[in-house]
Image (tube, rainbow, N blue to C red):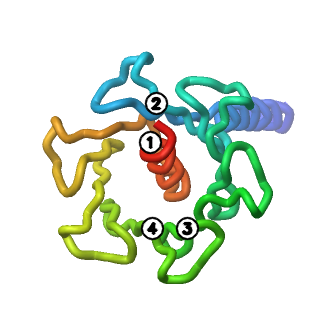
């Protein structure tokens, strides 16, 4: 009886955790808002969707193996960025001249720089601030859950180059 009960509990827990992970998504909001009308994009299953959509036609980019692809593509010609060692490279490059940005200690720097004057933005507590600011008026966008570095870069791309 104990064995059957243990199996049932395990199956229930596994089913609950499995369905939770499958439904996991992170919404990105404009500024410091949490209003549904201010959703910029949604991150789900390695894809960035327009606003709060889950429609495959609204996939803005796809993340796979440290690469960001245009739309829902997996074709090597559609690689927008390659991520290696916290650096964002243009296309499928790993050449130092193709570094677009790099992330260090929650700060996104231009190119391969680590100079404070080259800080593009900084991330603190799921909020993204302009430059090196921590002032609430400088919040560019916020997200309601954790993002991996590739997801963070993909969201940054979407906000800067699509919207």
| Element type where label 1 sits in the image | helix
The CA distance from mark 3 to mark 2 is 23 Å
Q: Quadrant of residue 136?
A: top left
Report the residue at 31% width, 46% height from top: 128
The CA distance from mark 4 to mark 1 is 15 Å
Report the residue at 62% width, 66% height from top: 91
Which of pointers 2 and 1 lies earlier in the amino acid sequence? Answer: 2
Residue 135 vs 85, above or below: the answer is above
Q: Quadrant of residue 71?
A: top right
Crowding near the residue tagged with mark 2, few <14, some 14–19, many ≥20 C-alpha atoms within 10 Å: many
The CA distance from mark 2 to mark 1 is 8 Å
Query: Would residue 58 appear left or right of 160 to someone viewing this image?
Result: right
Residue 62 vs 24, above or below: the answer is below
Q: Are marks 2 and 1 in contact (CB under 8 Å)?
A: yes
| Element type where label 3 sits in the image | strand
Give the percent coordinates (x, y) of residue 145.
46, 39
Report the residue at 22% width, 75% height from top: 115
Crowding near the residue tagged with mark 1, few <14, some 14–19, many ≥20 C-alpha atoms within 10 Å: some
Query: Would residue 23 appear left or right of 134 to someone viewing this image?
Result: right
The CA distance from mark 4 to mark 2 is 23 Å
Which of pointers 4 and 1 lies earlier in the amino acid sequence? Answer: 4
Q: Are marks 4 and 1 in contact (CB under 8 Å)?
A: no
For mark 2, what is the residue?
A: 40
Which of pointers 3 and 2 lies earlier in the amino acid sequence? Answer: 2
Give the percent coordinates (x, y) of residue 60.
62, 39
Q: Which mark is residue 100?
A: 4
For mark 1, what is the residue?
A: 159
Which of pointers 3 and 1 lies earlier in the amino acid sequence? Answer: 3
| Element type where label 2 sits in the image | strand
Q: Which mark is residue 90?
A: 3
Give the percent coordinates (x, y) of residue 118.
25, 67
């Amino acid at each position: 009886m104990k064995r059957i009960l243990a199996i049932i509990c395990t199956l229930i827990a596994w089913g609950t955790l499995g369905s939770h992970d499958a439904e996991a998504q992170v919404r990105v909001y404009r500024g410091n808002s949490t209003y549904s009308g201010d959703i910029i994009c949604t991150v789900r299953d390695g894809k960035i969707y327009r606003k709060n959509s889950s429609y495959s036609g609204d996939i803005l980019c796809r993340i796979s193996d440290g690469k960001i692809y245009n739309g829902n593509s997996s074709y090597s010609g559609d690689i927008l960025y390659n991520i290696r060692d916290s650096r964002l490279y243009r296309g499928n490059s790993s050449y130092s001249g193709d570094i677009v940005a790099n992330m260090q200690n929650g700060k996104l720097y231009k190119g391969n720089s680590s100079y404070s004057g080259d800080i593009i933005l900084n991330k603190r507590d799921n909020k993204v601030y302009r430059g090196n600011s921590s002032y609430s008026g400088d919040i560019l966008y916020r997200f309601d859950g954790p993002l991996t570095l590739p997801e963070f870069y993909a969201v940054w791309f979407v906000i800067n180059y699509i919207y």
